[in-house]
Image: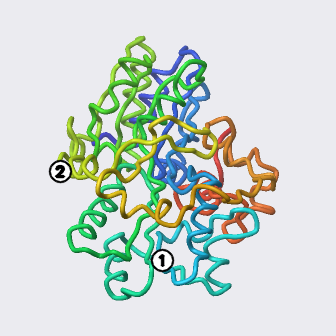
Amino acid sequence: MIDVKELTAKINELAEGMRPTTVMEVCGTHTHAIMKYGIRQLLPRNIRLVSGPGCPVCVTSQADIARALTAASRKNVIFMCFGDMMRVPCGKKSLLSLRDSGADVRIADSPMATLRVARENPSRDVIWYGVGFETTAPATAAAADAALQTGVRNFSILSAHKTMPAALRALLGKGSRVDALLCPGHVATIIGSDAFRFVADELKKPAVIAGFGAQEILAALVIITAMIKKGEVRCVNAYPTAVTASGNEAAMKLLLRVFEPCDAQWRGLGVIPESGLALKGEYKALDTATRFDLFDNIHVPDDDRGCICASVLRGDAEPENCPNFGVACTPTTPLGPCMVSGEGSCAAAYAYGGSRV
């Protein structure tokens, strides 16, 4: 593979005399890698690289978190989730503060682990909080299928799963200031490279699926810069070692059997039609929100503490634009999810010294 210096030189050569261009990445792992390797600092001034809604913890709305807090507060409940969700603030509460107050909230490394806890505690209601994109949703689908097949009746799923293509349609539509897209490699391994073709075919923006090393990201940016320079619009799979045109067909088949699209609220983007995943058919019996009536009378605190996470997720602001960044808001005292999650833009900027703005 071509080394970093050669790739950087190629980008600078192609970008000479080119109009100002904004490239958005929508993957938390890309965000982390770009900050870690200082890729923004390597780019010419007329190429701006911004982070979009690629961190699943970050895009989870206040309403979804409030619903999770309500579920976790119920008597006789064991509430389980990935570790990053524990510290996301919602008003003055979080799942971690609930646990400190006596609620049985636990970190799990998978939904199957949560299903095992349900089998071991048949007299308790055990809830899995499903958060993430198409990358993690198949694991939730597998747990749902296993629970139904084996008759584990005390297991349920609070789904806040979301799908990436629907969000991109909303974000990159009419009026968008984004010129090209660096597509998420992890999501693409599941849904396939063809799922991103609409970015080029319909939205008329270059799109490149990339891996996660510095060289892989820079190689993808070479392709994007060349397309912009030539006025070309294509969707290119620059991560063929992991991504195929059709993706993981077995995972997608399971996903489509268990879930159906639903309207979902995204932090920073509002409600996006058919961008969420809701349990369907016989699997609806496992839906936590339906089982415990978590649709009405859920108090959603105002997000008014000066956090600009919503603007960061839209690519409208950088972490350093926030007056609380690194002062009132740090990884130990986060005001919003972008500083909580290791995939969040604010946490990455804090860890690696920020970005060029």
Residue at coordinates 71% horizontally, 70% vertically from top-left?
A: 93
Compared across the picture, whether 349 is left or right of 147 comes to right
> Where is residue 303 shown, x and y percent of the image?
75, 53
> Where is residue 149 shown, x and y percent of the image?
20, 68
**Which amino acid does the dot numbered 2 rest on?**
Ala
Which residue of the protein is positioned furthest toward the top in this rendering?
231
Residue at coordinates 61% horizontally, 63% vertically from top-left?
A: 340
Please name the residue that numbered disc 2 is placed on.
250
Compared across the picture, whether 97 is left or right of 238 comes to right
Rendered image quadrant of residue 52: top right
Count neighbours of disc 2 (C-alpha within 10 A) and say few if under 14, some if 14 to 19, many if 20 or more.
few
> Is residue 39 in view from this perspective?
yes
> Where is residue 139 shown, x and y percent of the image?
31, 61
**Which amino acid does the dot numbered 1 rest on?**
Ile
> Is residue 5 in view from this perspective?
no
- Dots 1 and 2: beta carbons under 8 Å? no
Compared across the picture, whether 127 is left or right of 342 comes to left
Please name the residue that numbered disc 1 is placed on.
107
